[in-house]
Amino acid sequence: MLSFTETEKRKALQALQALRQRVADTLLPDDEEKLRMILLDAAKKNVVTRDVFGLNPILMALQTAHIAVDEIGLRRDGVIAILVQPLTVDGNDGGEAPLTLKSIESLFGVGVAAIVRGLHKVQELYKKTPVIETENFRNLLLSFAEDMRVILIMIADRVCIMREIRDTESTEARRRVSEEASYLYAPLAHKLGLYKLKSELEDLSLKYLEHDAYYHIREKLSATKAARDKYIDDFIGPVQEKLEKVGLRFHIKGRTKSIHSIWQKMKKQKCPFEGVYDLFAIRIILDSKPEREKMECWQAYSVITDMYQPNPKRLRDWLSVPKSNGYESLHITVLGPGNKWVEVQIRTERMDEIAEKGLAAHWRYKGVKSGGGMDEWLAAIRTALEAGDGMQAMDSLRGDLYEDEVYVFTPKGEIRKFPAGSTVLDFAYHIHSRIGNQCVGAKVNGRNVSMREKLHSGDTVEITTSTSQKPKREWLTFVKSSHARSKIRLALKESQAKDGLYAKELLERRFKNRKVEMDESLMQQLIKKMGYKEVSDFYVAIANEQLDTLTVIERYLELKNPASVASASASSESGVPRSAAEFVLRDTDVSASPANAMGKPSTDVLVIDRNLKGLDYSLARCCNPIYGDDVFGFITVAGGIKIHRQDCPNACELRRRFGYRIVKARWSGKSGGQYAITLQVVGNDDIGIVNNITSIISKEEHITMRSIQIDSNDGIFRGTITVLIDDTNRLSSLAKKIRNVKGVKAVSRL
């Protein structure tokens, strides 16, 4: 059973009493009794144990709740969620923990269950081991938490932990949580207007991460405190007298800068502690009516600058144009007694409350804004919080902020931001244009999906590629990002240019076979006469087989020698026999062979490699060759080369009819990616056999299942499984494993 030390008992009672005083009016009649029974039951069953720092989780929950109430302004739902979350399992099934989300909902309502669910989701997000020291992760965290109170509780929890880990023996864990407090939680607290907690997180992080610097500055501040207090009094006295004379109602206080802030100045200015002159700031807080706020702030500014010389370069007017996070104040730096520069902040009670208390501040003057960016949204959160703990407006506010963007993970845990509605293909092009051009799909959270699959915040995306894949114009219809769209257009343009070049070479070869000399100027006339405005369009039409090369040659001969063509036509029609010498055997000239077309002996072998340049080749769909298969090349009408397996169903016909267009080929190097192949599996229709087969495929590395179709008849099933695979070795290994499944009779490749 979890035991409490005497110190822990005292702290727990103090936190409990403070919570009762602050939230008693928001609790339902039986809430406290339910919580007491749950906590006692958890302690008796020894469900909760001390964490890595040796801290008592129940005490930590009570202290975190106290921070959330006192510093942030959370009430019933937030407090209960903090107290029960350590005792809850994620999901509806029971476990060691005594509570489930369903039981929390029945005991305390939907609001508490939503917060606990959000806390579990964020924990799952952490398990993806992302690179969290980025702005994108902070934004993802804000979007991933369904209820904004989840983020507020996380900040309160981190403050509580940082206060308690001073003497821990786990120095590595302390370093990790301190770094996270510095680059994640402190900026989040700042964004949310929790400036006091932000400063505390920064100071404690500095204390644990840069121990010597922290204590050096703290000792210096202690040594200079008396002199600093005297100087503040000397400065404030005359200012107070002048402000009273002009009839302003106010109070003044001096504020020493945080240790973290001083350390940052020392590093930025590359100076010792004594070189930092603005160690403190004087704050003048006016008691003004809303309609007189700006006027009275500027009136106070006038009084101070009449008394002390201002530095115009250090004027910060956040009064006329408030900071985007809602901060309002007038900052000036003046030359005070003893020729020392002093920062003076002028603001009203309302402005000071916003600056100090953040989310608990009164935003009734602003009203709820929507449809804006991050900062307008944060201001609206403050308004919603003030309205009560129910947070009814929170869902719509969250939607306003994140309706235009999603945050997804790479397999290495890096976060990428995309417009809402972006697809797997957008992600692929964001990684690299080559990855995008060869994308055939992806694994999203371990699930195989197509390139059209839309992304959602928190998804982990792993792109699947194939060297035989090429960009298609239809891709432009479903990609969302301008980056992907521009890369697809560029790839299509390059492909079109390449196709045009091959078409031109093909046409020149056909002319040569016919023993016809091509005249460039005459060809230009023919192209225009055939209705093509651009030469490139003409050659693309040949590449796409929209225009036959034989037709082009006939039209060219007509244009070159109309009388000869007419005579030949008349001779043919008159039935007069012609000499065999007039005929030319097409496409059988030695020069037409693919090897000679490349200027090499016909015995050369085409070596297929992923880095092959200057030659357009693709894998035939009739036999789907993969790396390691015995293959040959076939020169297509468009001039490109199709790679076929030696045992392709069409191989015999191709060799018989177009032997002159066959070229020897072999693979080289390593596999250039994954290839799609289809296996046919036949076996007894036993229970679980399909599950066993798919389980084997899912466990194989570098093998991705694209589709499966099963047909059962008379106790025999026949299935076709399409997978992406690297080479024939992996294919043989996979087929062998499937054959070993009980009930499988045959495995063959289609």
Image (cartoon, rainbow, N blue to C red):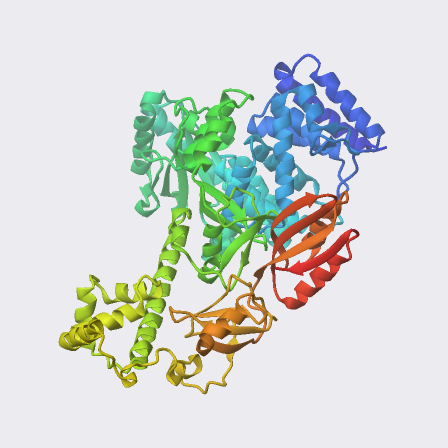
Task: Classify residue 527 as left or right of residue 417.
Answer: left
Closest to the observer: 62 or 274?
Answer: 62
On the image, the x and y values in percent for residue 497 come to 33, 67
Identify which residue, 600 or 366, lies in the foreground. 600
- Location of residue 273 in the rendering, given as x and y in whole percent from the top left corner: 52, 53
Residue 229 in view of the camera: no
Q: Is residue 174 visible?
A: yes
Left or right relative to 686: residue 155: left
In the image, what residue occupies the spot 68% across and 50% down? Answer: 718
Where is residue 483 shown, x and y percent of the image?
A: 39, 53
Q: In which quarter of the view is residue 29 placed?
A: top right
Quarter of the C terminus within the rendering: bottom right
Direction from residue 672 to residue 38 in the image, left or right: right
In the rendered view, tell whether residue 53 sits above or below residue 369.
Answer: below
The single residue placed furthest to the left in the displayed view is 563
- Quadrant location, the N terminus: top right
To which quarter of the image does residue 54 belong?
Answer: top right
For the image, the number of numbered tags is 0
Query: Looking at the picture, how far across and down is residue 73, in whole percent?
Result: 56, 26
Q: Residue at x 45, y 39 (%)?
A: 281
Residue found farthest to the top:
29
Q: Is residue 97 above or below residue 693?
A: above
Q: Point out the residue furthest to the bottom here.
A: 601
Say if 748 sits above or below 97 in the image. Answer: below
